[in-house]
Image (cartoon, rainbow, N blue to C red):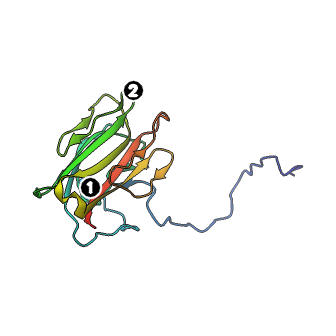
Amino acid sequence: PVSSAKNDALIWGAAPQAPVVKPSEPLITFGAKSLGLPEPAPQAVSQAQGAIALKVSVHIQGLGDREFGSQEWAGTRGQSKGIEGFSIALASPIPGLKLEYMAHLAGVGDTPWIDAGQYVGTRNENRRVEGFAVRLVGAESVKYDVCYVGHIQDMGDTPILSDGKYCGTRGKALRVEAMKAWIQAK
């Protein structure tokens, strides 16, 4: 018998069978078919008309470099593996439109803004990316928004951010485990 509601109780023996409840989304989710697992069902973000294709490359802790596309989770979710670095590029160049990004690296801090296609971060140093931001520049940038989401350790998915707003944390030692980015017409 339990004398107080504050006490824990442990019952030995066979427990009654509870119905198995399957989660609506897998507990472990990878970002792309390139990792050999099916992509989860699309969520609130859908491919917008006028979207521009991106190439996203990430270096995943313990797994190495992987390639992803627009609106794919680049990295892992639920695997406790951080992104150590990344690069983002337009799949096809557009005159007057350039992409730039920056990252906040553990033990380093904020990097400068760098041009599309250049790698930011480290490889095989266990130095996590803790946050990032992406922006568009050039004469054509007024016609588009760049949007992105991060999956942060112990926090989950961030809200959708855009146009240079910081995504992640600083000074909390929390890793970015995955990111998703896309460009859409305004």
Measured Cα–Cα span from mark 1 to mark 2:
33 Å
Which is more toward the observer, 19 or 163?
A: 163
User: What is the secondary structure assignment of the residue under circle 1?
Assistant: loop
**Which residue lies under the disc numbered 1?**
36
Q: Quadrant of residue 64?
A: top left
Which quadrant: the C terminus? bottom left
User: What is the secondary structure assignment of the residue under circle 2?
Assistant: loop
The image shows residue 183 at horizontal and vertical percentages of: 25, 60
**Which residue lies under the disc numbered 2?**
107
Q: Residue at x 40, y 67 (%)?
A: 43
Above or below residue 185? Residue 95 is above
Name the mark on residue 151.
Answer: none
Single out the residue that lies furthest toward the right. Answer: 3
Which is more toward the observer, 10 or 51?
A: 51
Q: Quadrant of residue 21?
A: bottom right
Above or below residue 61? Residue 56 is below
The image shows residue 39 at horizontal and vertical percentages of: 32, 62
Which callout, 1 or 2, points at the residue further toward the start of the chain?
A: 1
Asked whether, in this view, residue 66 is left or right of residue 159, the answer is left
Q: Amino acid at mark 1?
A: Gly
